[in-house]
């Protein structure tokens, strides 16, 4: 008799045939501008650790102290016996940093999107989503019983059209959901205009700011600060796994939002609380960013330099407005070949291929880091130029 799990191997082989399988490389040591991957020292150009805070001495020290004071974990979910003072201190820090009344910490950004979005709208409601929103937003929306509409990417005329159609349909509640920074192209949603349209049409707004924190706004406070609409976005989702260099997600907004989320979000209610070491590191990362804004400035200095040099060589960096800098090469095979040649030259930057992007938009997605030196950037640029010429990209 055939094993009931034989389909697993068959499905995996189909992925291999289509070049859609992930081959995991091993990071041997900290994620830093110079890292060791599969035994090879490389320049790290594909980590979301924008500000290198995962290696900041204050962040590491706070994590170590928390273990001695609070132990390794709580052994519970927060609603029962796992709600430590540290968790609430982190939420107070988030609220202050984002200029909101309150915040609620989730296990991850994915848990926040998949746990809260299904609760904000239900049958008889409407959710309106940007066509290029992140997969965790899409999965959260799929869990709702609300009707769904899509608007063209960052197209405010189309969003206005959809909102007008929704108004005529008589939905009870309408929710607009968008990424703040789009992770594949590095472009920025016009959140100021989205908020204005939402207010005009009586809709709620939900912004995933995962790639905006530590990058945009005053001192890296994110996209609401960037567009000066603090307090006007109904729900801001964020993460600690990128610019803050740790792990975890959160939602920030009103006190009513926090109370609603902690009573209704099953991903929060049924997930164990963050270990004290993680929570303390997140608190310390916010504090570092508040007193050392120079890391954000250095990130942007590196971004402007690297992007300009790539363009001068003839590489296509698309519509990037942020430290996410795609090098668009077209075919998936070319992107993979470029990544392999870069790795041989000591540059770690992975390919992004279909179906993550359109078939003719395969790319190497580079991400800048505040702590990488100009000398190392020049080394990386040299590797791009040589590999690009070998593959006849430039």
Image (spheres, rainbow, N blue to C red):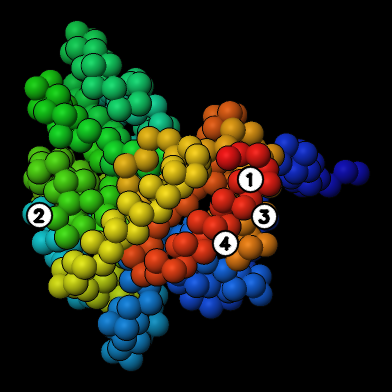
Marks 4 and 1, how far apart at CA: 16 Å
Residue 212 position in % (x across, y down): 28, 50
Residue occupied by mark 1: 389
Residue occupied by mark 3: 341
Q: Mark 1 near mark 3, Cβ–Cβ under 8 Å?
A: no
Which mark is first along the chain, 1 or 4? 4
Eye-nearest disc, 3 or 2: 3
Q: Residues within 10 Å of mark 3 (few under 14, many from 20)?
A: some
Near-viewer residue (98 or 104): 98
Which quadrant of the structure image shows residue 132? Answer: top left
Using residue 103 as the reference point, say whether residue 22 is left or right of it: right
Which quadrant of the structure image shows residue 355? Answer: top right
Eye-nearest disc, 2 or 4: 4
State the quadrant of the C terminus: top right
Which quadrant of the structure image shows residue 164? Answer: top left
Marks 3 and 4, how far apart at CA: 9 Å
Near-viewer residue (165 or 258): 165
């Amino acid at each position: 008799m055939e094993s009931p799990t034989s389909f697993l191997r068959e499905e995996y082989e189909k992925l291999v045939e289509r070049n859609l399988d992930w081959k995991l490389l091993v990071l041997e040591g900290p994620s830093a501008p110079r890292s060791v991957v599969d035994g090879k020292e490389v320049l790290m150009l594909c980590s979301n650790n924008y500000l290198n805070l995962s290696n900041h001495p204050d962040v590491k020290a706070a994590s170590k102290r928390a273990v001695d004071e609070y132990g390794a974990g709580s052994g519970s979910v927060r609603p029962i016996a796992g709600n430590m003072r540290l968790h609430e201190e982190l939420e107070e820090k988030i609220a202050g940093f984002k200029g909101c009344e309150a915040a609620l910490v989730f296990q991850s950004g994915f848990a926040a999107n998949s746990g809260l979005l299904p609760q904000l709208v239900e049958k008889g409601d409407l959710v309106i989503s940007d066509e290029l929103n992140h997969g965790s937003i899409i999965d959260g929306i799929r869990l709702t019983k609300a009707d769904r509409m899509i608007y063209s990417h960052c197209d405010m005329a189309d969003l206005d059209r959809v909102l007008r159609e929704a108004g005529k349909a008589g939905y009870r509640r309408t929710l607009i959901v968008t990424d703040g920074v789009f992770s594949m192209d590095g472009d920025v949603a016009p959140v100021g205009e989205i908020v204005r349209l939402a207010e005009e049409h009586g809709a709620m707004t939900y912004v995933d700011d995962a790639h905006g924190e530590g990058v945009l706004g005053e001192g890296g406070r994110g996209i609401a600060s960037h567009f000066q609409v603090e307090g006007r976005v109904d729900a801001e989702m964020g993460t600690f796994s990128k610019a803050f260099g740790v792990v975890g997600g959160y939602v920030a907004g009103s006190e009513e939002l926090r109370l609603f989320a902690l009573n209704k979000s099953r991903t929060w209610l049924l997930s164990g609380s963050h270990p004290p070491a993680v929570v303390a590191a997140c608190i310390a990362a916010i504090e570092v960013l508040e007193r050392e804004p120079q890391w954000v400035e250095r990130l942007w200095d590196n971004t402007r330099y690297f992007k300009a040099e790539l363009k001068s060589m003839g590489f296509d960096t698309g519509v990037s407005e942020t430290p996410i800098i795609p090098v668009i090469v077209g075919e998936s095979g070319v992107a993979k070949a470029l990544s392999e040649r870069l790795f041989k030259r000591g540059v770690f930057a992975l390919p992004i291929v279909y179906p993550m992007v359109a078939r003719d938009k395969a790319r190497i997605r580079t991400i800048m880091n505040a702590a990488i030196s100009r000398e190392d950037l020049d080394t990386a640029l040299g590797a791009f130029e040589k590999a690009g010429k070998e593959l006849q990209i430039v």
